[in-house]
Amino acid sequence: MPTPDTSPAAHLIAACGGRVTRARIAVLEILQNSPRSLNHDDVAARLAEDGMPHDRVTLYRTLDWLVEQGLAHRVIGPDRARRFKAGGETRSHHAHFHCDRCGHVLCLESIRPEEQFTLPAGYQPERAELVFHGTCADCGRQRGTKI
Amino acid sequence: MPTPDTSPAAHLIAACGGRVTRARIAVLEILQNSPRSLNHDDVAARLAEDGMPHDRVTLYRTLDWLVEQGLAHRVIGPDRARRFKAGGETRSHHAHFHCDRCGHVLCLESIRPEEQFTLPAGYQPERAELVFHGTCADCGRQRGTKI
DNA sequence: CAGTTAATGCAACATTGTAGCATTAACTGC
DNA sequence: GCAGTTAATGCTACAATGTTGCATTAACTG
Ligand SMILES: [Mn+2]
Ligand SMILES: [Mn+2]
Ligand SMILES: [Zn+2]
Ligand SMILES: [Zn+2]
């Protein structure tokens, strides 16, 4: 029986008013420790590695909850699977880069497409999603290496 | 037994070198006659209305073929279903607008995000997808009317 | 520590998209 | 026009992703 979790992740979750469960702590820490966005399967695999597997449905609900609370954000990608990353994006909505070689989705925090474009009359945009496709820095360096 | 179809759609299909089938003609004309993008179900419903229903799988393959040939293009949207619109987009890759009220996806031909942004060193972008979310011109005009 | 209730696990289902293969129909050459 | 060839279609079964309902568990409360 582990002592009550006092990790930063646990504190963030507690601050939202929800219950601080092992699943939420573990998932949020996995997102926080990953440099790139993860889909449900990625998270499930890491949970299993760490010896705490969870049901598929729990994972869907946990990730949705983290997004609702602003502790994670969804990344739009070309495949049908949703991807997630730690941190909200309501304020700083940034662009993303999808690598066609390794399949990773990375955040481009420096690029914020909001208010960069003038829409035709009548349209009332509330947010913009910008996704680049191509070769990421890692894959561009190691040509020919299949990750 | 209808006479050989000499519609513009049939000519476009013939110019691609593929067989000019009823399914391809009907689907392409449906896309051409729609002001907004359509998903597979939308197209299937219109085909059924016109008295020529087709198998689900045929529709998937037909739409994919039209995109391969450059006669249609895929629209990225927030839901899991792909949407299609007549016309290629290899050259003029434009932005799209997703209306949160009526759910329609519209093309913003005037907005082309390519080469508008400078990426961090190492990234080699090949194309960009830009999607706005908000209220479309129609929904902004007719407040409270549910389409 | 016991009681309350949110969170979880499980099973079943829904949606979207694919693969294999037999059948049909569009083209080709006559 | 007609027969032969083969691309396209229809059908079935399946895969991947996500959702719903409900019984059980575990996190909080006092
Ligand atoms: Mn991001
Ligand atoms: Mn378009
Ligand atoms: Zn890469
Ligand atoms: Zn609208």
Image (cartoon, coloured by chain):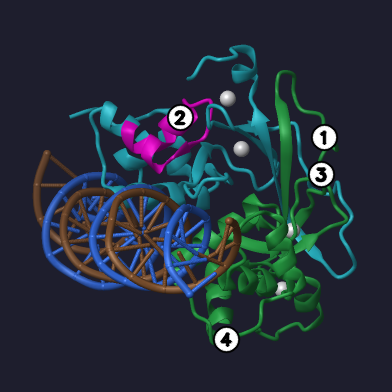
Chain colours: A green, B cyan, C blue, D brown
User: Looking at the image, which residue is at 30% across and 48% down?
Assistant: B56
Q: Which mark is residue A117?
A: 1
Up the image or down, B31 lies above or below D3; here it is above
* SS of the residue under disc 3: loop
Q: Which residue is mark 4?
A: A1
- Chain letter for the residue marked with disc 1 in the picture: A
Q: Name the amino acid type tagged 4.
A: Met
Magenta-span inclusion, residue A16: no
Q: How many angstroms separate mark 1 from mark 4 (CA)?
A: 54 Å
- Classify residue C18 as left or right of residue B142: left
Q: Pointer 1 and pointer 3: residues touching (CB < 8 Å)? A: yes
Q: Is residue B18 visible?
A: no
Q: How many angstroms separate mark 3 from mark 4 (CA)?
A: 47 Å
Boundaries of the magenta span: B27-45
Q: Which residue is mark 2?
A: B8
Q: Pointer 1 and pointer 4: residues touching (CB < 8 Å)? A: no
